[in-house]
Image: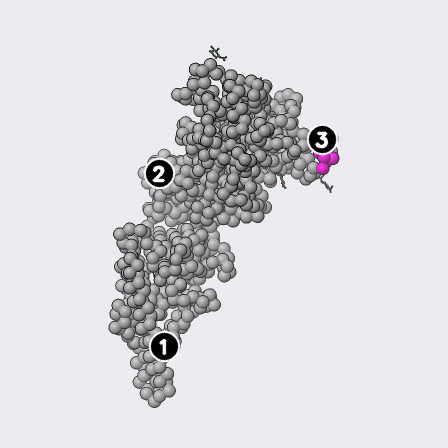
Amino acid sequence: VFVPMCLLGCQRFSSPSQNYSTLLLEEDNGVLYVGARGALYALDTTNISTPGNLTIDWEASAEQKKQCLNKGKDNQTDCYNHIRFLQRYNETHLYVCGTHAFRPLCAYIDVERFTFSSGFEEGRDRCPYDPAKGYTGLLVDGEMFSASQYEFRSSPDVRRNFPFPTLRTEESPTRWLLEADFVGSVLLKESVNSSVGDDDKIYFFFTERSQEQMAYPSQTRVARVARICKGDWGGQRTLQRKWTSFLKARLVCSVPDYELHLNVLRSVFVLEGPDVHSTVFYGIFGLEWKNIKASAVCQYSFTDIQRAFEGPYMEVQDSKWREYTGKVPVPRPGSCITDMHRSQGINSSRDLPDNVLAFAIQHPLMSTQVHPIGEHPLLFKRSVNYVKMAVHRVAALDGHVYTVLFFGTDEGWLHRAVAIGGQMHIIEELQLFVNPQPIDNMVISQAQGSIYVASNSAVLQVPLSSCQRYTSCFDCIFARDPFCAWDGALCVKMSSRTNRSNLTQDIQEGKRGCDNIVHRRRTVMSGDDVLLHCDLRSNLATPRWTLDGHQLQGYGLDSGHRVGTDGLLLISARPDQSGDYRCYAVENDMWVPVRMYTVRVHPDLPTEQPLPSLLAPLPPGPKFQTYRHMEAMYISLVAVLGGLCLVLTVVLLYVSFCSRGPYQGCNKRGRHSLSVSNLGDGFLQIAPAEGSRGKSPPPPAPPLPMPPPLPSSEYASSEYTNGMSATLPSVLRKMNGNSYVLLRQTTDPEGSTSPLYHSFTEELNRILEKRKHTQLDPQATDESSV
Ligand SMILES: *[C@@H]1O[C@H](CO)[C@@H](O)[C@H](O)[C@H]1NC(C)=O
Ligand SMILES: *[C@@H]1O[C@H](CO)[C@@H](O)[C@H](O)[C@H]1NC(C)=O
Ligand SMILES: *[C@@H]1O[C@H](CO)[C@@H](O)[C@H](O)[C@H]1NC(C)=O
Ligand SMILES: *[C@@H]1O[C@H](CO)[C@@H](O)[C@H](O)[C@H]1NC(C)=O
Ligand SMILES: *[C@@H]1O[C@H](CO)[C@@H](O)[C@H](O)[C@H]1NC(C)=O
């Protein structure tokens, strides 16, 4: 549901400082540690706006700022102390690093008193100088691992910062990293229950300049995952103080339908399972061209990553990277020390033979690419840049565990999506910040049922779900929000109820359980004009439409849709207009849901065929029309249309003859009934609607070119002002009978209630509709356009 501001249940923390970039959540202690520009805060997780939180002021000295300015750095952003690293060191202390006006420093924080417990340490090798540089780091068992391009001129590096000896990546003769921009890292404890005595591993996620041949020469960057073994100590002679276990592989995230390769990794979230094989991670990908907004979310399994690292290597041959097909030394280069190594007397990486290490220097890159689960993104969105994400799993009423994903945009929005059957549904979009600003960081607290969102100006605590925002059964069920269920009167948080027997929820379909939800499916062809009918019961109400929970804006011709009093018209539908449409009657700020449509717009058929839209929605199967059937139908339709023209011509001649001539009876007869039989299927009739309409006004006529000047045209034209046509004549006149589609809602799809129609178009639509029902589409629920 579109919500312009964070209204319900949001808590906000801000202070004179800005750039709240670093978050450390400790649920057990109920503390959210925040690192900002020049300060650190310890906030109460139950309510981060509770006053009296602990604070450490840590700004760079005036002298240091002056030196920074002398280096030519930006006095607005660079010459401050931006906190970049903040993690738990041991039971009593945190470890923190800041950019400190281009001279990074680190320090220990005594958690109890929330003060620095010692002097500052040199941070040059642990923290980047530039507050905006990609950076990731971990503290594991008193060891610090980090990855960044630390100094302006230095090469990017994956490091073990302490204890001694420090370890780094190799730069010659093969550079292991090229202009790498790091976005995340994770420790996976693969030693636990390992049958081969495996080591724990640390994975790093980044984008770098591509070395290998790219499918698209215009793309210069490539998304990667790299890993090192935690127990790596470097080599003895070869690869001294360098990783012996550094391997990297390419991450692929492409949208096959658009042949789009999203090659820049913006953010990752690792969702840990009980073991490494059930652990997955999600990546947000974008394009390297900054001016094009697009986001894809791909999901990967660590099993696939492991497989890539166990597969063939790449090697430079004739200055090109190619798959290496030669002999691989034993033990396998780049692997962790396992029982197999130990049985050969190799107890640590220092015992590895030189030939293995020499091979490792030259072969950091794997040939196998890591593809997403299902080979395609879970979500692809144009015109939006997701920059941060967090993922949460929640058990729904149906017993399934659903994955709920939170995305932060570069403009301060929070999107919430739920993965249902391999597809992602965005269920909420919240604008968290009035001034557009990128979301810098997000963490989820299961215990608090909150997500903490950090940006330049503030930290917000947002409920994982606000069920009370759904005011009707329809809204509650249709939202498909696994946190929420309808109890017969209210939309309630599931976790707030111990007795769930009277709760209703339908995550899979989003429609069961409420009596009054009218839900229709529409499958149309790209280019069709589609009218989604929605009659408002109150004259005071204004219609409002949402697409996938997002309010439809803009009524210009280029917006692709127009809203009328009786429905929504999609003009020349595009595939990206597919989705769930909802019509609301809005009165006094109350949004009352009226109808819901699930619209699927098929892309164009590759070849021109008669009546392509009749073919398109057909699933391949026994019911599939043969081309011959189509041809016959097309011909018969042409015959119908031809016949119609003929009749009209006759009528025209007749009318003009009558109006000129002295025959007084003509006019009267023509006005009352004109029936054309013997044409087509014989059920085509043109009847002026006089007398047959009764008291209730008919559905508005599809605003097509005005019917020919039939004697009855005065009736018809008076009706045209009723519907959308009054506002849309210029648009609609451009349409021909085949491209304009009226999808009228009747509870009886055969429409046997009224045999009388008030326009040609509707008449033709009925014919085509009938054909479709009888021949093409046996499912009344999945209706298609013609
Ligand atoms: C810090 O915040 C300001 C706006 O308040 C923004 O212009 C700047 O880019 C931010 N710096 C970083 C490193 O995020
Ligand atoms: C959180 O704390 C603020 C400030 O004390 C208070 O105004 C607000 O009502 C609190 N919110 C909740 C949900 O307790
Ligand atoms: C930054 O530098 C500009 C120009 O040198 C100066 O006008 C401005 O006051 C400085 N801002 C700060 C915060 O020092
Ligand atoms: C934690 O580390 C700090 C800093 O090295 C040290 O002073 C402190 O004694 C350590 N605490 C424990 C419980 O080991
Ligand atoms: C490896 O460890 C075993 C048992 O601890 C020892 O016998 C062996 O000499 C060690 N090998 C090397 C190369 O240090």
**How far apart are the two marked residues, 1 and 3, measured between alpha carbons?**
88 Å
Using the image as rendered, state which of residue 113 and residue 339 is in the foreground: 339
Q: Residue at x 74, y 35 (%)?
A: 70
Say what secondary structure mark 2 lies in.
loop
Which x, y percent locates residue 520? 35, 54
Q: Are marks 2 and 3 in contact (CB under 8 Å)?
A: no
Depth check, front residue: 9 or 519: 519
Cα–Cα span, label 2 and label 3: 58 Å
Q: Return the disc, 1 or 3, that comes first in the chain's sequence.
A: 3
- Residue hosting label 3: 64
| Element class at badge 3 | helix
Judge whether 167 appears above or below 424 on screen.
above
Please report the residue visible at 41 percent of the width from the left and 27 percent of the height from the top: 275
Q: Which quadrant is the C terminus positioned in?
A: bottom left
Q: Position of residue 768 (x, y in %)?
A: 32, 63
Is residue 242 at all visible to an observer of this figure? yes
Q: Which residue reaches farthest front?
A: 318
Circle 1 packing at 10 Å, graded few (<14), some (14-19), many (20+), is some
Inspect the image, locate mark 2, and give the three-letter code of the amino acid beneath it: Leu
Q: Is mark 2 within 8 Å of ligand 2?
A: no
636 up-or-down from 363: above or below: below
Can you tell which quarter of the image residue 207 is in? top right
- Tell me the tag on residue 397: 2
The magenta stretch is 67-72
Quadrant housing residue 634: bottom left
> Mark 2 to mark 1: distance in Å?
59 Å
Residue 111 location, x and y as percent? 57, 24
